[in-house]
Amino acid sequence: MPSTAHQEFISPEESWLLRPQLINKLNYLNFLDIPLTVRFQHGTLPRTLSLSAIPEPCQNGYGFYRWSPEQNQGSIPPQFKFQDILIEDGNHLIIIRPLHHRWDSDGGVFELPEQGQLLNERTSRRYICSSEVRVELIQESARFTGELIDFSSSSFSARLDLVPPQSFAWIDPDTPVHLIMTADHEVCFAAQCQIIRTQWGAQTGTCVLKPLKDQSRRFKPKRYRSQRQKIQPPPSLIFYHPLTGRLSEMTVKDLSGSGVGVETKKEQESLIPGMVLRKARLVFAGGSIFDCCLQVIHTHSVSDKDSEIVNTGFALLDIPPEQHTRLLALIYQTAEPNAFINHTIDIEALWRFFFDTGFIYPEKYIHIQPRKAQIRSTFEKLYTGHPSFARHFTYQKMNRVLGHMSMLRFYNRSWMIQHHAAKTNESHRAGIVVLEQIGRYINDAHRLYQSQMDYVFCIYRPENKFPSRVFGGAASAIGDPHICSRDTFAYFHLSQKPASQTKIHQRPAGHEWRLVPSDKEDLAELTDWYNVQSDGLMLKAFNLTDDDNDIQRLSEEYRVFGFRRERRLFTLRKKGRPVAVFVANRSDFGLNMSDVTNCIQVFVIALEFGAIDLIHKALAKIMAWYPDTEIPVMIYPDSSAEIIGLPTEKKYTTWVLNLNHTDRYFEYFSRLIQITKKLTPKSKEPNISTGSTN
């Protein structure tokens, strides 16, 4: 097989290896079964025959080799005369010109010279593919397959096999092709390439290809990007190279929650923009290990005194959520030592914090006091068990909680932001820090599939100034309900009566009215009505559309960690037409302080004559599913509650953000933070709650 390895050495600086060094090099190649190249020159024409061979053990002045199996070499044509032996050594090339050499159909023997020539300054090192890497070359709907021979950081050499009726004439070398590489049945590289050279045979051929782009773009660019941090001591990035199968280790230069940067010498560069590392590991001092999948985004050369350094940037494609949370905690603490994610908290200190800040105010405490044992048990499991669907963010000094905020995945791909409070008399920064922290976490995590994060939402009282300013202000500034929306519910507590303990599916009254489990048609009607009413994001975020309403997998995830999260959907129909949709959420008491995670939501689609009494009766029947004697009810739209005649204790706004548009939110939020920091007094002030986002 022709070899092109030596063709990439330019302006060589000559040096020499002595015979003992050549013997060591040959034994090294034999030990790892790495081939060398034996070259033969045509007697009269400018043609070179390059054959692959495996060296045998060597201990004296003679070297031996056997032809590589793929050569299937019988005899060398008589018009070719032996020229030299080549050994690839990284970005160097060793040339051996034996004193005597003879060969046959099995291999050859040669007498080693006193020294061999060493050529330096190769433009880029070529790597032999030690594992099978399949290639697909596609051009104008024609698909050719084969395998990768070798590669450098800037080009590939591939062998293609024809499948009738294919012809290599189908390939236009002046037109770009799409190249796909697979290793272990998974795509490890794909890109548009330009054909540099070709050597076509009757049934097989080789070609050298060069990627058209010097960087890859995995995600849509964002203005507000993840912040990179330098970690000391620096961690290592360890992976098996997808094209060579060899273990590689690189020093991490900087790290963020969505990417990794490493430095290597140019001569050692083996990564190409677009390449995917499916089983990479970040290893920190002390043994902390993070398993991840990375994609090379760019490789940039920078001059560093006497040596050329290559900076390589990776995008984080996948990582187990619990490992990602630990990694983010480590990164964030590098910038802010007092900021923690999912840190183990003294639960008694947390309760003291909630009462001291006024987060649990008297009216709220009267509501939760009869079930304080349950709420304490729930918090114990949330803050010490670290379930996969919960995160908490704290600002702490000397084991004292000064700021707090948490998140809960309450729907399939929607996380609820809640329980924001801070001790501003001890730290004027605490409330802002945890809010910034949760924003960074969302920005770093939402693109990862395993994070299950398409939306974030919070439910707050409109009169609470802080959430109204932060979240409500963002919705007003963005001005697009498809990106950020608000919807208001009326809220009250419904007491259960013994007479209501009847079966849920029983018809409330009359033959034209029925209370039945909701079907797709009901949810399609609800969606159309809501789009006219609000045109916001709430139904999508809450999995209440006709094509997305099953939360069984999420319910099972809660159950695995010892929690309850169940939901039932009912529709009140008149003559088959939906009048109201009831969403019965049942969960552990205390998941949310206002119990909006354990309530009945009512979407009043049409106020038909007679609907008022029927909605009352439907609520009573649905409440039979709950073991509680009192349950919160949320009515949407809020104006319906007064018409129906239900008492309104308070109102709650549901705020939802589509995370495909985080830049719009962070643009507003950064302006708000700058204003807030300028206005925040440096002196101490009384303890306050920054507003309960629950």
Image (cartoon, helix red, strand yellow):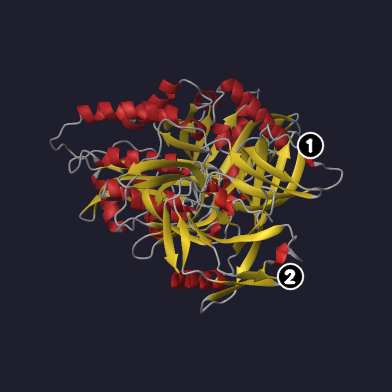
| Position in image of residue 373 (x %, y %) | 38, 58
| Position in image of residue 175 (x %, y %) | 68, 32
Residue 24 vertical placement versus 396 (above, below): below
| Position in image of residue 546 (x %, y %) | 68, 35
Q: Residue at x 57, y 23 (%)?
A: 535
Residue 505 left/right relative to 691: right
Q: Residue at x 56, y 38 (%)?
A: 542
The local secondary structure at tag 1 comes to: helix
Using the image as rendered, state which of residue 139 and residue 462 is in the foreground.
139
Q: Residue at x 44, y 44 (%)?
A: 313
Residue 370 vertical placement versus 466 (above, below): below
Q: Which residue is mark 1?
A: 170
Q: Residue 650's quadrant in the figure?
A: top left
Residue 536 seen by the camera: yes
Q: Which mark is residue 484?
A: none
The residue lying furthest to the front in this view is 44
The residue lying furthest to the right in this view is 165
Residue 438 left/right relative to 215: left
Q: Residue 693's quadrant in the figure?
A: top left
Q: Residue at x 86, y 46 (%)?
A: 164
Residue 506 seen by the camera: no
Mark 1 and mark 2 residues within 8 Å of each other at the beta carbon:
no
Using the image as rendered, state which of residue 584 and residue 173 is in the foreground.
173
Which residue type does callout 2 highlight? Ser
Q: Which residue is mark 2?
A: 105
Using the image as rendered, state which of residue 65 and residue 220 is in the foreground.
65
| Position in image of residue 497 (x %, y %) | 54, 45
Residue density around tag 1, few if under 14, some if 14–19, many if 20 or more, within 10 Å: few
Residue density around tag 2, few if under 14, some if 14–19, many if 20 or more, within 10 Å: few
Which residue type does callout 1 highlight? Trp
